[in-house]
């Protein structure tokens, strides 16, 4: 027996044959429709046979009065995987949920019981069961009047006869037995492509052939897969989505049909997709530009006129505009009109940020202790194509003032930068004053950030205990920084990894020690993974080294120290590393740290709150032959807030043999 079904519904009655019906054409991709979660419920006009509702007929009026106000309970005997569908969509179950306290008449209950088997079959067809059987049962000993049994009628009350005592209404126990039978699986597939894509593939176009092969390879309902209506709809949606992302936004279904053989429990799928024309990039127009020059936003464009219009390219361009920090909102859109396919106009709508912005903030960190931050941002100072950011931070242990000037985007796309900073930090028994001046360029792409610059800096250190100057060294260097990220989420990652690396070559100028050439390298790897269900892991490793003669002085800010929130927890910020004879930190020329952390939510009802355990190890030293690891381990709480993960950790520093509290927000790479 061969049964057929179209896009919006599939039906098969195992007790009777049907003639295959014509399958309507699909809705165009520009206005897709999706069937409801459950099919329309069909209620028979007349009650089914006695086998479906074993209640013999009686005096309707008497039994209506008899059952008025009687409560009832429904038990569904079905496989666990199917019971939720029946409990949610079956009329009998929905009536039970909506009317628990009020009674039900015999006529209404009979109607629900008689309609239930047919409704069960329709519902289970959406789950791939086309031979389901169902029956309802009303036990005779349920304590309620049942079919074929006449209830005694109490005589009317009179003055001499007191009214009968009212007793609690009995509960009718209704059972629904469901046998779904074998599940239907996919037993054949034909997926044909028509239109410009097929023409290009036939002419030998490599990308067109590869796309057609990808459509067939990624089809989500292969042979042997259980056939469900949800899976059928999702598989077809995925085909159109892939075509749209690869430059065919007008793609639609010319024909799709699923022929179900209820006796063989197999479904044969036949699909014809019309690709429509290949859309290509045309001209770009912009709305909302005022203080940002047109050439700046055009410099970020990553496509050329005439290239295939792929959605990922548009998303990448939109992300580039957002990352400039020049706009509050960005939207890149186009009209999928087949008449404009050869040169599709692209419209970019932006809302620029205010010309000037000022923000204040308060916080606490392992580096600075309590702090207050003041920031000012000017999008176009002196009417130049630059962005100026001034930041003042005042903390208990750290104070800084910085000015960053960044040009609006240039072709490449690059941005020029000029930066200067003055900072004072107290850590490891030292007061360190650092002065920096930087001139360079930066480039941000979808995955990689690059910065190269020349830098002049000076580090002046003073021992807090003796108030003696311990170092005063300057340096000029050429630097390169490289960051690569591949995370599943930019703020709250659970999968992926990232690498940051920097290198420098320079010459130092010391007042008390020997000046000379040096080089420096540093690399950091951060990885996130899921070792098990609802378990989340994080690994961090960092290596660094300064290459120079031991007698050559290097500014303290270019040497290495370990310890702190993103280094080795259980120890203070930059408290690990070599010291001199007086106990003052001198900075190390090598660094190695590592961390392993496991976390999981406290409760699945509150997935934003996690508990974590961790172990950190690492240190800085004058050389690898003197390096030894300092250990820290403990437990903490994570709150995955919309702006980043807030971490509170209590760590035990093994060397210090004491606990230390750490508090951070966000991720560090």
Image: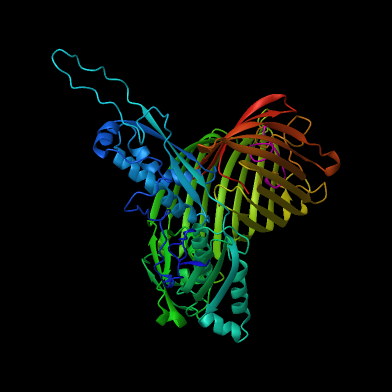
Q: Position of residue 179 (x, y in %)?
A: 53, 47
Q: Position of residue 74 (x, y in %)?
A: 42, 36
Q: Which corner quadrant of the image does residue 197 belong to?
A: bottom right
Please tell me whether residue 559 belongs to the stretch shown in magenta: yes
Q: Is residue 103 visible?
A: yes
> Is residue 73 depicted above or below 343 in this figure?
above
Number of marks present in the image shown: 0
Residue at the left extreme?
159
User: Relative to residue 147, is residue 389 drawn left or right?
Assistant: right
Q: Which residues are magenta?
A: 557-571
Q: Which corner quadrant of the image does residue 69 belong to?
A: top left
User: Relative to residue 205, is residue 313 drawn left or right?
Assistant: left
Residue at the bottom extreme?
203
Question: Coloured how?
Answer: rainbow
Residue shown at 56%/68% (left/top)? 268
Q: Position of residue 33 (x, y in %)?
A: 40, 64
Q: Nearer the viewer, residue 470 or 210?
A: 210
Q: Which corner quadrant of the image does residue 184 belong to?
A: bottom right
Q: Is residue 398 visible?
A: no
Q: Nearer the viewer, residue 233 or 21?
A: 21
> Is residue 564 depicted above or below 454 in this figure?
above
Q: Nearer the viewer, residue 66 or 522?
A: 66
Chief SS of the magenta region:
loop
User: Relative to residue 598, is residue 394 drawn left or right?
Assistant: left
Residue at the top extreme?
160
Please tell me whether residue 515 belongs to the stretch shown in magenta: no
Residue shown at 61%/64% (left/top)? 222
> Is residue 333 depicted above or below 200 in this figure?
above
């Amino acid at each position: 027996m061969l049964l057929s079904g179209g896009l919006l519904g599939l039906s098969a009655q195992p007790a009777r044959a049907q003639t295959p019906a014509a399958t309507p054409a699909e809705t165009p991709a520009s206005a897709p429709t999706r069937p409801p979660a459950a099919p329309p419920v069909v209620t028979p006009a007349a009650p089914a046979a006695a086998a479906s509702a074993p209640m013999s007929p009686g005096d309707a009026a008497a039994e209506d009065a008899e059952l008025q106000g009687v409560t009832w309970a429904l038990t569904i005997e079905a496989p666990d995987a199917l019971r939720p569908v029946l409990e949610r969509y079956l009329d009998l179950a929905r009536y039970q949920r909506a009317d628990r306290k009020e009674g039900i008449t015999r006529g209404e209950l009979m109607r629900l019981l008689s309609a239930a088997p047919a409704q069960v079959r329709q519902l289970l067809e959406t789950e791939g069961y086309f031979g389901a059987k169902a029956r309802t049962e009303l036990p005779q000993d349920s304590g309620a009047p049942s079919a074929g049994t006449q209830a005694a009628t109490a005589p009317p009350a009179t003055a001499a006869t007191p009214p009968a005592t009212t007793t609690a209404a009995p509960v009718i126990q209704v059972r629904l037995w469901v046998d779904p039978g074998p599940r239907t699986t996919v037993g054949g597939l034909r997926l044909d492509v028509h239109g410009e894509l097929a023409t290009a593939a036939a002419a030998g176009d490599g990308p067109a052939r590869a796309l057609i092969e990808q459509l067939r390879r990624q089809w989500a309902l292969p042979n042997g897969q259980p056939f469900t209506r949800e899976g059928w709809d999702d598989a077809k949606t995925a085909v159109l989505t892939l075509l749209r992302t690869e430059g065919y936004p007008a793609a639609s279904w010319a024909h799709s049909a699923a022929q179900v053989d209820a006796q063989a429990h197999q479904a044969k799928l036949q699909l014809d997709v019309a690709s429509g024309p290949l859309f290509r990039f045309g001209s770009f127009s912009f709305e909302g530009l005022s203080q940002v020059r047109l050439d700046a936003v055009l410099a970020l464009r990553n496509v050329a006129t005439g290239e295939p219009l792929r959605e990922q390219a548009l998303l990448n361009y939109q992300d580039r505009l957002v990352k400039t920090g020049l706009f509050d909102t960005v939207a890149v859109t186009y009209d999928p009109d087949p008449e404009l396919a050869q040169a599709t106009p692209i419209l970019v709508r932006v809302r620029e940020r205010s010309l000037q912005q000022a923000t204040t903030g308060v916080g606490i960190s392992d580096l600075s202790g309590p702090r207050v931050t003041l920031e000012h941002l000017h999008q176009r100072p002196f009417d130049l194509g630059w962005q100026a950011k001034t930041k003042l931070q005042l903390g208990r242990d750290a104070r800084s003032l910085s000015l960053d000037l960044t040009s609006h985007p240039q072709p490449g796309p690059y941005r020029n930068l000029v930066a200067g900073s003055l900072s004072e930090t107290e850590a490891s028994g030292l007061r360190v004053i650092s002065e920096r001046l930087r001139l360079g360029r930066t480039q941000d792409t979808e995955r990689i950030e690059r910065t190269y610059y020349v830098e002049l800096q000076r580090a002046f250190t003073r021992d807090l205990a003796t108030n003696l100057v311990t170092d005063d060294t300057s340096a000029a260097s050429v630097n390169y920084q490289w960051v690569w990220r591949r995370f599943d989420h930019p703020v709250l990652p659970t999968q992926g990894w990232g690498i940051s690396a920097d290198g420098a070559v320079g010459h130092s100028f010391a007042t008390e020690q020997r000046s000379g050439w040096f080089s420096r390298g540093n690399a950091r790897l951060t990885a996130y993974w899921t070792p098990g269900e609802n378990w989340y892991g994080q690994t961090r490793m960092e290596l660094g080294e300064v290459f120079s003669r031991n007698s050559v002085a290097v500014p303290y800010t270019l040497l290495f120290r370990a310890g702190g929130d993103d280094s080795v927890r259980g120890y203070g910020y930059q408290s690990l590393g070599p010291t001199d004879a007086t106990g003052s930190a001198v900075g190390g020329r090598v660094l190695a740290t590592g961390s392993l952390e496991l976390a999981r939510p406290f409760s699945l009802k509150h997935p934003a709150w996690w508990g974590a355990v961790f172990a950190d190890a690492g240190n800085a030293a004058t050389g690898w032959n003197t390096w030894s690891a300092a250990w820290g381990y403990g437990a903490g709480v994570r709150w995955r807030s919309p702006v980043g993960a807030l971490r509170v950790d209590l760590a035990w520093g093994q060397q210090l043999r004491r606990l230390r509290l750490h508090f951070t927000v966000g991720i560090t790479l």
